[in-house]
Image: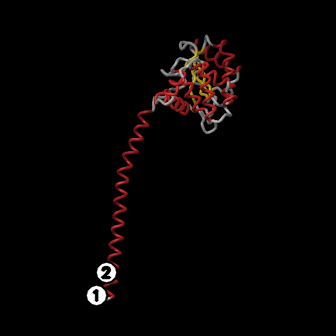
Amino acid sequence: MSKRDQQRQKKEAMQQAAVQREQSKKLFGKVALFGIVPVLAILVLYTLFTQGPIYSTVEIAENDHVRGRESNPVTIVVYADFQCPACATENATMTQLWPSIRDKAHLIFRHFPITAAHPHTWTASLYAEAASNQGKFWEMHDYLFATQSIWASLPSFAAEQEFESYALELNLDVDQMKLDMESDELISKVRNDQRSGNSSGVLSTPALFVNGKLLARPSRNRIVEAVEEAYADSAD
């Protein structure tokens, strides 16, 4: 075989190898596509079907936490973050004025954890929900806000130890709480609260609505005035 024929055969072999590599790439791409698309579809469907319903600021969800008689005509909905200092202030204000409005209103608490700013707020919400499973939501809610200055600056493990100590003081079954905190139902509750807040236009916490109207700067006087006005409107 001449040298020219050898070069020609070598060139043809290189071209054939290049074609085979290209075909292999296309085949791999198709396999990857058919492998990934079903997985993505499953994830999307799982996300859609595991999301619970969301509720407006004039509705009461079956799993909402309500303080006061639901038959009272004024609905107060608070979206709050347990590690938010302004939320702790709002809660202290609401606690002080509640006796003066409790015959006219009912109060709904919904979670709105802003985890980018508050690293312990998600865990705090889970502890509150786990306490709710044992009938002590409001007790844990009040504990978390009252002690916020203690646990907010702690490392994560120390904050969880603090939360656990509150549970023990409330005579809760801590082992059961930890199991509940991993349940889809409990986690979905917090996520769906946040989704309902997003749907209602919540951008920051605390966000307080009185009969569906967002109340800016919810001071004691402004809350009382809004409740009185809503109560008067309900009587017309």
Which residue is depicted at the point 30% across and 89% down? 2
State the image coordinates of residue 81 (x, y, percent, origin top left): 61, 30
- Amino acid carrying mark 2 in the image: Gln
State the image coordinates of residue 122 (x, y, percent, origin top left): 57, 32
Mark 1 residue crowding within 10 angstroms, few (<14) / some (14–19) / many (20+): few
Between residue 235 and residue 131, name the one nearer to us.
Answer: 131
Dot 1 lies on which element? Answer: loop
Which residue is label 2 attached to? 9
> From this viewpoint, is residue 160 visible?
yes
- Which of pointers 1 and 2 lies earlier in the amino acid sequence? 1
CA separation, marks 1 and 2?
A: 10 Å
Q: Colour scheme used in the picture? A: secondary structure
Which residue is depicted at the point 56% across and 14% down? 73
Camera-near label (1 vs 2) is 1
Between residue 53 and residue 30, name the one nearer to us.
Answer: 30
- In contact (CB < 8 Å): disc 1 and disc 2: yes
Which residue is depicted at the point 49% across and 31% down? 182
Dot 2 lies on which element? Answer: helix
Position of 57 with respect to 222 (left or right) is: left
Which residue is depicted at the point 33% across and 88% down? 3
Residue 223 position by quadrant: top right
Residue 174 position by quadrant: top right
Farthest left residue in view: 1
State the image coordinates of residue 45 (x, y, percent, origin top left): 40, 38
Q: Residue 1 carries which label?
A: 1
Mark 2 residue crowding within 10 angstroms, few (<14) / some (14–19) / many (20+): few
> From this viewpoint, is residue 236 visible?
no
Figure disc tally: 2
